[in-house]
Amino acid sequence: MKDDTHVVTIDRHIIDQERLQPEATGAFSSILTDIALAGKIISHKVNMAGLMDVLGRTGDTNVQGERVEKLDVFAQEVIYRAMDHTGHLCCMVSEEHPEPIPIPEKFPAGPYVLVFDPLDGSSNIDVNVSIGTIFAIYRKVSNEERGTEADCLQAGRKQLGAGYVVYGSSTMLVYTTGSGVHGFTLDPSIGEFILSHPNIRIPDPPARYYSVNEAYYSRWSPGQKRFVDRLRGTNGASGPGFSSRYIGSLVSDFHRTLLKGGIFMYPSDERNPSGKLRLLYEASPLAWIAEEAGGRASDGRRDILDLVPEELHQRTPFYIGSTELVSLAEEYLSEDG
Ligand code: AHM
Ligand code: MG
C-alpha cells in the first residue's frame, strides 16, 4: 500500500537541493519557495476565473502592443509582491513591463535577478484552456546595488534556476536548478505542491508529435515548409507521418512535449522575422528545462541557451523538444542559407 505519510513537498525538495550546494546561503531557495507561493495564489484565482469578475480585458495594451487581460495584471502583482521585500533580488523583468522593475528603496536589495512571464497564453483564459507562468533566476553581475540592464541581459546558460507553473486540469510546478527536472502537483486540499514527477526525462523514443501553428504555413521559409512536410509524411518520407498537437498556449504545449516527446516550434515567418516568443523569459527557461531533461532547444541555427539577449523583450524563433527532431529541424533550415 502506498505510504501517504511520506510525501515530498516542494519546500522539502528545495531544501534537499540546497544541501547539494555547500556554499548556498538559503537566499536562492527562498526565491523558489516564494515563486511556489505566488503560483498557488495565481492558481486559485485562475480556478475561480469563471465564477468571478476577473474575466475579460482591462482595455490596456502592454509593451508588446498586446491586449492585457485582467488576470495578467493580477499575476504580475502577485509575483511582484511575493518577491519585492525579501532582500534577495536586485530587480525583476516581466513581460508586462518595458523596463527592469527595481526593488523599492524601502526594501533591501540582493544578488539575484528574477525574469518572468506572469501569465503566458492569457488569450486562452476565457475558454478554460491551460495557461502558465514561466520564470528564471540569474545572479547579478554588475556592482549596482539595484541592478542594471546588463544584469538582465545574460545568456540562458547563466541561469541558476528555471521553471514554470501550468494551470491545467491540475496545477503543476516544474523546475530545475541544474540537477534534473522535477515536477510537483498542487494538492488543493492541503495547499501544497507534492513531488509527483521526479527526474523528468523526455521519452526516447519520443511520441511522434509536432506542434506548430500551421495557419502560417504560406509565410514560412522553404526549409521550414519542407521540414513540416516531412513530419506530415507528405514529401516522400517513408513510414507513418507524425500527428499534430497545437494548443496555442506555450507552457501547455511545452509541458506535453516534455512528458511525451516530439517537437514544438514557433518559427520565423515573412511577417514576424524573429517569430513571436521572447528569448529571456519564455524561450531560455524552457530551453534549460528541455536540456536538463535530455532534449534540446534552438532558434533554428544555434542553441537557445547560447544566445545573449540584446533587448529585454527580444523575440526569437523557437524549436524545442526531442534532440533528434530539433537537430533535424536545423538541418532543414540550413537549406534556407
Ligand atoms: P502571450 O505571451 O501574449 O500570452 O503570447 C504567447 C502565446 C504562447 O503561449 C503561444 O505559444 C503563442 O502565443 C501562440 O501564438 P499564435 O496564436 O500565433 O499561434
Ligand atoms: Mg508570454
Image: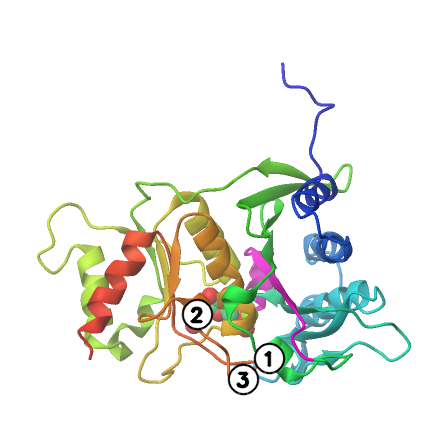
Write the residue at 51% across / 72% down. 155
Helix, strand or loop under label 2:
helix
Question: Which image quarter: residue 318?
Answer: bottom left
Residue 337, how many percent across, how many down?
20, 80
Q: Which residues, given as a range, are shown in magenta? A: 122-142
- In this rendering, the answer to whether 164 lies above or below 306 is above
- Identify which residue, 35 or 132, lies in the foreground: 35
How many residues crowd mark 1 within 10 Å: few (<14), some (14–19), many (20+)? some
Judge left or right: residue 232 versus residue 20: left
How many residues crowd mark 3 within 10 Å: few (<14), some (14–19), many (20+)? some
Q: Which residue is mark 3?
A: 311
Residue 327 visible:
yes
Q: Which residue is mark 2?
A: 306
Helix, strand or loop under label 1:
strand
Is 138 colored magenta in this rendering?
yes
Is 145 colored magenta in this rendering?
no
Judge left or right: residue 143 versus residue 208: right
Query: Marks 2/1: CA distance?
Result: 31 Å
Q: Which residue is mark 1?
A: 67
Question: Mark 3 belongs to which amino acid?
Answer: Glu
Direction top: furthest residue = 1
Write the residue at 45% across / 49% down. 258
Residue 61 visible:
no
Question: Mark 1 belongs to which amino acid?
Answer: Arg
